[in-house]
Amino acid sequence: MRKILALILVGVMLTATLIMVGCGGAQSTTSSNEKSIKVGVSMPTKSLQRWNQDGSNMEAKLKEKGYQVDLQFAENKVETQVSQIENMITKGAKVIVVGAIDGSALSSVLDEAKSAGCAIIAYDRLIMNTDAVNAYATFDNFSVGKIQGQYIEEKLGLKEGKGPYNFEIATGPLDDNNVVYFFNGAMEVLKPYIDKGQLVVKSGQVTREQCATPNWDEAKAQERMDNIITASYTSNKIDAVLCSNDSTSLGVQSALKSAGYGSADKPMPIVTGQDANIANVKAIVSGQQAMSVFKDTRALADQVVKMVEAMVNKQEPEVNDTTTYNNGKKVIPSFLCKPQFVDKSNYKTLLIDSGYYKESDLK
Ligand code: GAL
């Protein structure tokens, strides 16, 4: 009897073990289906249109390739971005794509990533003072500034010696490394005209520090321009404003409009921008903003997906610049996409025919 019982027991145990092995097997097949490699995408904020687009383009393209994507937005708070990246490392991301809020505030979390064997791609903005960044994908940021400067140069006829014109500048935050390039690119074109007196900056604010806009905040750009208008333009009019991106541009446009610009006898000055955000393209169509710089985020996302694939396969990512972007620790191998100017004359071809926006988006 005992023998029979023992046999039954062994039988039960064997079955149970088989079932467990079976579950384990089933589990591992499910997880190997789902186990696709994890990629983190850490974006700075949802508050600007472009980052939403960047995030969703990348998520879609990475998913198409079978990656598991963890997409996070940090609402412009550095601590949030740090903890989101930490979380991605803990969850086993093999590659993390980071659009930094403050390029100098990520050294220690990226050291953690490096020790965990996780590769880092700096997205759009360079990450400073760390050797944990493997590659950088961005647009040619110096060209962005140059395109804006050349637009003002051409529309005001500065090469032909015209002027003097009144001119002001609104650029981005001091913690965004791109701003150095936007500002220097534009100033390479415009500074000689300031020196010659063809462009007159009545506010006297001409350095990157003086013209900065913290967080690219539209309201702050507006407030600063309100103050400049009150202090320096009660009896003069402004002819051009170099705005480094579209949110600063909208802020400046609001200040100008409240000061009466935009009417037949006081037309809007030439106001630049960058990103071709929908609100700004509408402003271009209605004649309030002169131009923007179109950075096709689809092209950038494609490049980043290629970089991710290379890194996962332990290959060198494709780059086209190995000299420009020194982050204080090393020169980061970079891929620079090409920015393009957009204004009323070409927005249809560039933005609508290419499928970037639908005609109805701009209504
Ligand atoms: C920059 C970026 C620009 C603009 C700006 C505001 O770093 O290169 O395209 O979007 O941030 O977020």
Image (cartoon, grey):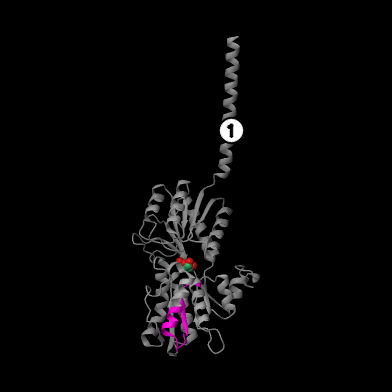
In terms of image quadrants, where is residue 58?
bottom right
Q: Position of residue 187 (x, y in %)?
A: 40, 78
Q: Secondary structure at mark 1?
A: helix
Q: Which residues are magenta?
A: 226-246
Q: Position of residue 138 (x, y in %)?
A: 46, 64
Indicate the amino acid at tag 1.
Cys
Q: Nearer the viewer, residue 73 or 324?
A: 73
Does the segment drawn in magenta span residue 229? yes
In terms of image quadrants, where is residue 199?
bottom left
Left or right, 297 with reference to 178: right
Instruction: Tell me the residue at 34%/62% (across/down).
Output: 328
Which quadrant does the N terminus fall into?
top right
Which quadrant does the C terminus fall into?
bottom right
Regarding residue 139, the answer to whether it shows in the image is: no
Q: Nearer the viewer, residue 260 or 80?
A: 260
Q: Is residue 229 above or below residue 35?
A: below
Q: Position of residue 349 (x, y in %)?
A: 60, 74
Q: Position of residue 330 (x, y in %)?
A: 35, 60
In the displayed image of the protein, which residue is found farthest to the left? 329
In the displayed image of the protein, which residue is found farthest to the top? 1
Left or right, 192 with reference to 152: left
Q: Which residue is mark 1?
A: 23
Does the segment drawn in magenta span residue 361? no
Circle 1 Cα neighbour tier, 10 Å, few/some/many (<14 / 14–19 / ≥20)? few
Instruction: Tell me the residue at 55%/56% (across/down).
Output: 59
Q: Is residue 3 above or below residue 295?
A: above
Instruction: Tell me the residue at 41%/50% (across/down).
Output: 113
